[in-house]
Image (tube, rainbow, N blue to C red):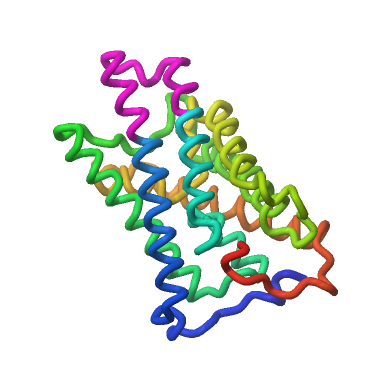
Amino acid sequence: MPIARIAMGTPGEASKPEAIKAAVAEFISMLIFVFAGEGSGMAFAKLTNGGAGSPAGLISASIAHAFALFVAVSVGANISGGHVNPAVTFGAFVGGHITLFRSILYWIAQLLGSVVACLLLKFATGGLETSAFALSSGVTVWNAVVFEIVMTFGLVYTVYATAVDPKKGDIGVIAPIAIGFIVGANILAGGAFDGASMNPAVSFGPAVVSWTWDSHWVYWLGPFVGAGIAALVYEILFINQSGHDQLPTTDY
């Protein structure tokens, strides 16, 4: 059972050069992802005088986030595993591929990367704010939680299938593309309802900069539940437990 392989680690991990480099890689990857993803929405709104909520705006956001995540995962893959998402890190932790203390280090770096990206966007755009994620009219918090659970399940399941599974073979080469594609597709599916976060850090940065926390817990609970379920399902059903030891962090 994957739950039996969960490791706490030690506080000393935070001072190891390898762990620090991995955290810095996560910070940079998250900054790249959020700056491009959130920035694309701000740019579209500026060009269309606030039309970011249109179908064209949704497609623009989907493409921008898919491209940006593909790059962010790719540039961090050989250093930190290219998680670029606290929910992905949590899924890796549940599966026994990363310790709790290393996960906490990643989470801090990911959240800081998102906040810094949003601050840079605010400065670079002359004071425009990155809008916090919000629920659309008629969408309840529990509707949104289900959306986030299902979308993040799809994302983390894709991560496991293409990057974590030791039997992945050549398919591991296209992992960043597949991960970017599933995020882009999920934005098309859920963006009009709750913004389609799938990533607590992506929601956290705009919330901090705009200081808007309405229903913010949705964007933590949903992704973490979805990631945990995906990790357990893939580990139990498709990874050979008897012959599978804990993977190094740099290989997800």
Residue at image point 69% right, 74% down: 246
In percent of width and height, residue 44 lies at 34, 21
The quarter of the image holding the C terminus is bottom right
On the picture, is 210 further left or further right than 143? left
Quadrant location of the N terminus in the rendered image: bottom right
Task: Name the residue rendered at 61%, 50% in the picture.
Answer: 226
Magenta stretch contains residue 46: yes
Work out whether residue 232 or residue 173 is closer to the camera in this orientation and state it.
173
Residue 35 x %, y %: 34, 41
Image spot of residue 144 (x, y percent) = 52, 37
In the image, taking residue 17 as reference, residue 45 lies left or right, namely left
Question: Which region of the structure is painted magenta?
Answer: 39-61
Residue at 36%, 21% (x, y): give it.
Answer: 52
Q: How many marks?
A: 0
Q: Quadrant of residue 214?
A: top left
- Left or right placement of residue 221 versus residue 4 in this view: left
Q: Nearer the viewer, residue 20 or 155?
A: 20
Q: Hey, which residue is sitting farthest left in the picture?
A: 126
What secondary structure predominates along the stretch shown in magenta?
A: helix
Residue drawn at (34%, 16%), measured in percent from left and top? Answer: 51
For residue 202, above or below residue 11:
above
Side of 6 where 31 appears, left or right: left
Q: Provide residue 183's location: percent of width, then percent of height.
A: 56, 38
Q: Is residue 23 magenta?
A: no
